[in-house]
């Protein structure tokens, strides 16, 4: 299955493949933000879309493989809550996200709601 982000005109911004790799486990591969749209937050947005899909489908874990020298992707996954699960000897590591942890970080509220901050003395 492929999960894509499209802009309002239907242009593809980013995509990734996801496959079930166990009863409660999803494997993510080939995540890519199209070159001209990089560094604008779509990587995080796509991870969020994958997590939403995983949650709705009852998965608990998301696994992926990453090249050790891919520092931007490692940073992005790390900030999204992925942790090193296995460090391979061939320059490829396995990272794993526990959906419950992602939800804890993200909060359980609708990000589109205009939330006001009020400071009272
Ligand atoms: C890795 C990739 C998906 C990131 O997507 P993106 O939309 O550019 O990332 P985002 O804009 O969501 O930013 C994610 C973080 O990386 C940082 N970042 C993005 N591009 C960066 C760059 N070129 N140099 C340094 N930091 C960068 C962002 O500042 C952000 O960090 P922050 O939370 O501190 O602000 C994208 O670079 C890509 O498609 N790379 C090629 C394919 C690839 O490596 N896929 C991963 C396979 S495992």
Image (cartoon, helix red, strand yellow):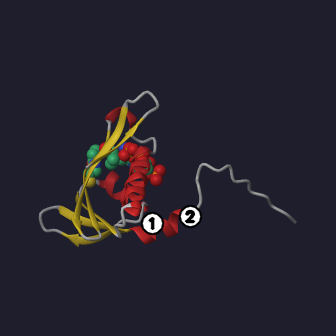
11, above or below 17, in the image: above
Mark 2 or mark 1, which has the lower sequence index?
Answer: 1
Outermost residue to the top: 9
* Residue beneath disc 1: 102
Q: x, y (%) of residue 86?
A: 22, 72
Q: Which residue sits at x=24%, y=62%?
A: 20
Outermost residue to the right: 121
Q: Is residue 105 left or right of residue 33?
A: right
User: Callout 1: 10 Å neighbours few (<14), some, many (20+)?
Assistant: some
**How far apart are the alpha carbons under marks 2 and 1?**
10 Å
User: Callout 2: 10 Å neighbours few (<14), some, many (20+)?
Assistant: few
* Residue beneath disc 2: 108
Marks 2,1: beta carbons within 8 A:
no
Q: Quadrant of the C terminus?
A: bottom right
Q: Which residue sits at x=74%, y=57%?
A: 117
62, above or below 13, in the image: below
Depth order, front residue of 92/97: 97
- Element carrying mark 2: loop
Eye-nearest disc, 2 or 1 = 2
Q: Which residue sits at x=52%, y=62%?
A: 106
Q: x, y (%) of residue 73?
A: 32, 53
55, above or below 29, in the image: below
């Amino acid at each position: 299955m492929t999960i894509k982000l499209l802009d309002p005109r239907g242009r593809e911004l980013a995509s990734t493949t996801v496959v079930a790799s166990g009863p409660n486990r999803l494997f993510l591969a080939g995540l890519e933000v199209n070159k001209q749209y990089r560094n604008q937050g779509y990587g995080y947005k796509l991870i969020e879309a994958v997590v939403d899909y995983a949650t709705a489908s009852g998965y608990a874990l998301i696994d992926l493989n990453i090249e050790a020298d891919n520092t931007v992707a490692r940073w992005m996954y790390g900030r999204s809550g992925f942790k090193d699960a296995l460090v391979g000897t061939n320059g490829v590591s396995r990272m794993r996200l526990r959906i419950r942890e992602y939800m804890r970080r993200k909060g359980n509220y609708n990000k589109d709601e205009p939330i006001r901050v009020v400071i009272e003395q």
